[in-house]
Image: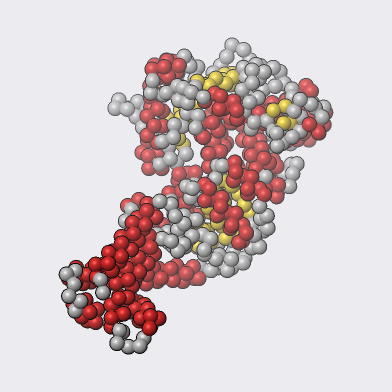
Amino acid sequence: MNLTVIFLISAAILTAAIAFAIVIGAGKYKRGRVLTPFNVVFGGVFLAAFVCLLPIYDIVLSDASSGGLKTITFTLYNTFKIFTFNADNEVVLKVINGSNNSLAAIFSSYLSVLFVIAPILTVGVVLSFFKNVSAYIRYIFNYFNDAYVFSELNEKSLSLGADIRKNHRRATIVYTSVFSNKDDAKSDLIEQARAINAIFYKKDILAVNFNIHYKKSQVVLYTISDDEGANVDQSLKLIELYKGRENTDLFVFSTKKASELLLAKADKGFIKVRRVNEIRSLVNRILYEQGAEIFKHANEADGENKKISAVIVGLGQHGTEMLKALAWFCQMDGYHVEIDAFDVDEKAEDKFSAIAPDLMSKEYNGVAVPGEIDYTIRIHSGCDVSTKSFADEIAKLTEATYVFVSLGSDDANIKAAADLRMMFERINAKPIIQSIVYSAYDKNALEEVTNYRGQRYDISFVGDRHTIYSEAVIMKSDLEEDALRRHLKWGKEDDFWQYEYNYNSSVASAIHMRARIACGIPGAEKKEADLTDEERDIIQRLEHRRWNAYMRSEGYIYSKSRDKSSRNDLAKMHNDLVNFSLLNEQDAKKDSSVGTV
């Protein structure tokens, strides 16, 4: 028996297993599957021990007519015994010490380490088993309650779960793919989830069968990890698993266009699927709840129209969405809007023009034509907020009334918002300043913040996770209810949830309806049948103006023909994207129907 060769082979196997486990643990792997760091180490220790014991039991059985198969079987049996605190140490040590090999002492010590590690790993397996059994037992006791199941435990899912628990004391809240570890942030999340009496599964959301849940109770599934690709992939598989179950909802958290297309194509059966575009939802929520303030702060002008002067700092996802939204939201009788958007990207204007070509077209941008949209958009590309050139541009905006800051991180947003307040104070401007802040703790701490002389910065911080990831916003949105009522004026409810074109269009209509009522537009609070001829004309013209701006913000262009057959939604070409004066009576009536309560 060559102990040197055996030792090197076994040690190499164990080292490789540990290294592979580290690589897997540091990267992204499918939680709840076979290939986990623990399982890799477990398998490595087993194989390393088997390699060590095989030649030893070959010697022990050398006097018997056993053959190779019996040697392997005996070695496997005794390898398993190592993991059950029942290793045959005396026989092993006797053979090693009798080998008269210079490495006998090292080999004995190495085997002793394996004999200690193996049963510890067994304890880990047993504890893991009982932890999963505990989860299943707790789940059974909550069999008749509504179940809310999350694909991952993170800050977003914890905020939503905590709000659900506050509103529904008997709800069953489940987090899947939860692994206890020494990561302080993860451990803190687990402790907070325990505080709301959540159930944890190590398996992923696809591996736990919630089809067995009481059929009359609601099962709500959330794919809510930071990996949007994984969210969509899991959602498509969940649809297949649960499309035959009634009382089932699926919320897919993704901002990607691909997710919209894939989910629209899927056969959903009974399951109600909703894609949550967190970026768009936040901008919609801001305008729906606080948008009236933008009109209230508009500047008086010499002419008939008040002037809204909006500033957007950062054209990432939030900033781009806000720029698109302000273009249609600010279409209001008695108002003109000018928007200055700043971004460090040298191609910012070019990129936005690709998203909304007609919105940025010289035919409409900065051109006021009766019966058409009225706005001016200026994009300042390659402008860094930390530079003097940015400060110089801000100094020119003496009539600024609304500022939206979104630079990608809380620290950057807070600093930029405070700096902007300073810059506007220097030119005696008092715009509303809103800044994205994800941390609920930071947001609360910054409320009513002042400088050392007690002067308020008067900055509104929006977008914190506790507010955005709540039942009222994600699942029972008053905005959605308003939008659905608008959609039902011309379509079916299934189409509202099935196609995001319908959903987004109706949401925009609901937001603008609330704003026009706040602005006192004649006829805005009336039903269509109650409108006077003058009010009907006002509503129709305003609604068409808003719709034109909305469609162009979505990337649509005029189809170059009034013929309905020229409409092509794949090409984003529409035959009605024209001046109000070119509409026939039937088309104009659609505007008064959609544009009334």
In the rendered image, is residue 163 in sight? no
Count up the numbered dots.
0
Q: Nearer the viewer, residue 55 or 155?
A: 55
As drawn, is 498 to the left or to the right of 393?
A: right
At 57% across and 21% down in the image, what residue appears? 377
In the rendered image, is residue 211 in sight? yes
Q: Quadrant of the C terminus?
A: top right
Quarter of the view holding residue 123: bottom left
Task: Reply above or below: 245 against 376.
Answer: below
Residue 418 in picture, x, y percent from top left: 38, 27
As drawn, is 296 to the left or to the right of 96?
A: right
At 32% across and 88% down in the image, what residue appears? 64
Task: Reply above or below: 530 against 160.
Answer: above
Quarter of the view holding residue 58: bottom left
Residue 74 in picture, x, y percent from top left: 35, 81
Residue 307 in picture, x, y percent from top left: 57, 18
Task: Reply above or below: 292 against 73.
Answer: above
For the view shown, which residue lies furthest in the bottom direction? 64
At 62% across and 67% down in the image, what residue appears? 215
As drawn, is 286 to the left or to the right of 79?
A: right
